[in-house]
Amino acid sequence: MDKFTVHKGLVAPLDRENVDTDAIIPKQFLKSIARTGFGDNLFDEWRYLDVGQPGQDNTNRPINPDFVLNQARYQGASVLIARDNFGCGSSREHAPWALQQYGFRAVIAPSFADIFFNNCYKNGLLPIVLTAAQVDKLFHLTAGFVGFEVTIDLPEQVVRAGDDAFPFEISAFRKYCLTNGFDDIGLTLRHAEEIKQFEAAHLTRFPWLNHRAL
């Protein structure tokens, strides 16, 4: 997955609490486990006025002009701010896939659902917990300034917004994985040579394991 060190990006505000994973990516899109193509259907039921289906061409679908991501000023946003309990509901790794494939690198909220929070880290999407007051200030700044951006400095663990700097917590292990671009597979592949040596020695010791059933 892509490394995350310092990211500066346009902010989009989703002023809702308890945004669940079915709102992030509706259930009909979960048939695919390809891990690609979910960005077009992020918040599908809120972005469009009809019911979307997997594989559908979204070009001519009627959009909801009132939904934040359909507004011109937020096109190209890569940082999403939201309210409490973001990512609640059923467990689905497709939710961070959809957010990331839409173009978001980070989500900032006062709290997240646990499973969604963990799934974000596994897929290179940074979930940042700030206080309700700090998030509220970000909402006010985003509403007040067209093109409002923040800078997220992961090594320093701080969100910079104009003259404000909001520190955030992250475990050393998760920080290490994100700054190096390691998902679970990447972590394992750091030891690829040792794994090969172990397998070779294991087969020397138990040579019958080389025989495979026809």
Image (spheres, grey):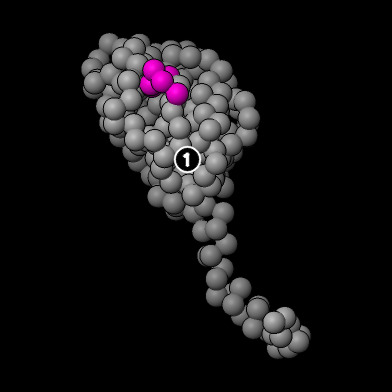
**Residue underneath mark 1:** 97
Q: Where is residue 181 in the image (x, y as percent from the top left)?
A: 44, 52
Q: Position of residue 178 (x, y in %)?
A: 47, 47
Residue shown at 25% from the left, 15% from the top: 145
Q: Where is residue 104 in the image (x, y as percent from the top left)?
A: 38, 34
Quadrant for the C terminus, please: bottom right
Q: Please, what secondary structure does the residue beneath circle 1 have?
A: helix
Residue 173 sits above or below residue 128 on the image: below
The front one of 26 and 206 is 26
The front one of 45 and 76 is 45
User: Hey, what amino acid is under mark 1?
Assistant: Trp
The front one of 76 and 212 is 212
Residue shown at 24% from the left, 20% from the top: 73
The front one of 85 and 89 is 89
Boundaries of the magenta span: 46-51
| Residue 156 counted in the magenta span | no
